[in-house]
Image (cartoon, rainbow, N blue to C red):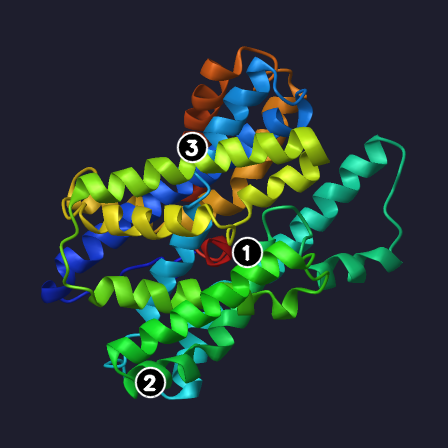
Amino acid sequence: MGINFKNKGVKAPLEGFMVWLDNSRIIAIFAVVLLHISARVVIQSDIGTTHWWIGNIYDSLVRWCVPVFVMISGALLLDPSKKEDLKTFYLKRLSRILIPLIFWSAFFLLFANLQNIIQGEPLPILEWAQIILSGRPYYHMWFLYMIIILYLFTPFFRKIVANSSKNEISILVLLTLTISALNSFLLPESNIFINWFLSYTPYFFLGYLIKEDQSDYPSPILWGVFLASIILTAAGCYVVAIKEGLEAGLYFYHYLSVTVIPMSISAFYLLKKLTKPIGSMALTKKIAALILGVYLVHPILINIINSAGYGPLNFHPLVSIPVITVVVFSLSLIAAWLINTVPYLKRVI
């Protein structure tokens, strides 16, 4: 998720470059929280009802968030001017994600099992390994399992960038993006996480291409593509869900669907135009450095709010979804900041 989260030692010439990427991280993590809250409304409401449509529109609005996080990583890590041997790269990058991955996988396994125990259905110990192999000790953890494998291949991808022209990389992105899009349409997702990174590799290279692209595409065109993609995502989900069931309709939510791909590309170009910090420069950097923590802890807060009877379906979703999103995002940010103040514990975010 653009998991070069801590911008230490950034040189002055890169300041403008880092600002829009920090802005992108903050906006994207807010979108992730909104996605996870609105998804509950889509899944638990009757298709075509007012509540369902509100959840569908909110959810469709932010489907670009995960591809943008992958593109941020590519923009940061595929720069061929970075001279690092394999040992240096792996120690620097993988250590930042491996410790949180192990800690939070164990935490959420225990958290999920506690929920099952409360419901009278404890999880058999033998199934824990299967859950880890599935890459989903909790529903949001899949991203870390995917990105860590993507990081394993990054030094080799960097060599491709260093020895390829812009046109060659563009063709590579086009071919791999087409294959990934067809794969997401034709085949069910693998139950083992080790090959997930293949589908997201095009976004990884695309992030570097967009970062390097000096073209200044008109904002009205970018906004037009972005908004049209949102409308088509919401409408496509409804049309297919009515005919084939919700599970089939949710194809349009897939991060490699025919509507989310242009949505994500236009979103990243629009985010690139945000060269001024969201708040002060210092505040923007501090928040951007905490987004991994926000990502990891926000499902706990969503679960608590839902259990307390204040979920998005307990009130009108037109208002409840954005309000709960702001509350969860703010509390998650505070929780991440508190964890970050503890000397040893801060390594888990």
Residue 12 tag number: none
Report the Cα–Cα distance between label 2 and label 1. Answer: 25 Å
Q: Is residue 301 visible?
A: no
Local crowd size for mark 3, using a 10 Å CA cut-off: few (<14), some (14–19), many (≥20) = some
Helix, strand or loop under label 3: helix
Q: Which residue is mark 1?
A: 143
Q: Nearer the viewer, mark 2 or mark 1?
A: 1
Local crowd size for mark 1, using a 10 Å CA cut-off: few (<14), some (14–19), many (≥20) = some
- Residue drawn at (19%, 39%) of the image: 220
Q: Amino acid at mark 3?
A: Ile
Q: Is residue 140 left or right of residue 211?
A: right
Q: Is residue 192 left or right of residue 326?
A: right
Q: Is residue 18 left or right of residue 266?
A: left
Q: Are marks 3 and 2 in contact (CB under 8 Å)?
A: no
Q: Which residue is mark 2?
A: 84
Quarter of the picture holding the N terminus: bottom left
Q: Position of residue 178 (x, y in %)?
A: 48, 64
Report the Cα–Cα distance between label 1 and label 3. Answer: 26 Å
Q: Are marks 2 and 1 in contact (CB under 8 Å)?
A: no
Q: Of the residues under marks 1 and 3, which one precedes in the sequence?
A: 1
* Residue 121 drawn above or below residue 155: above
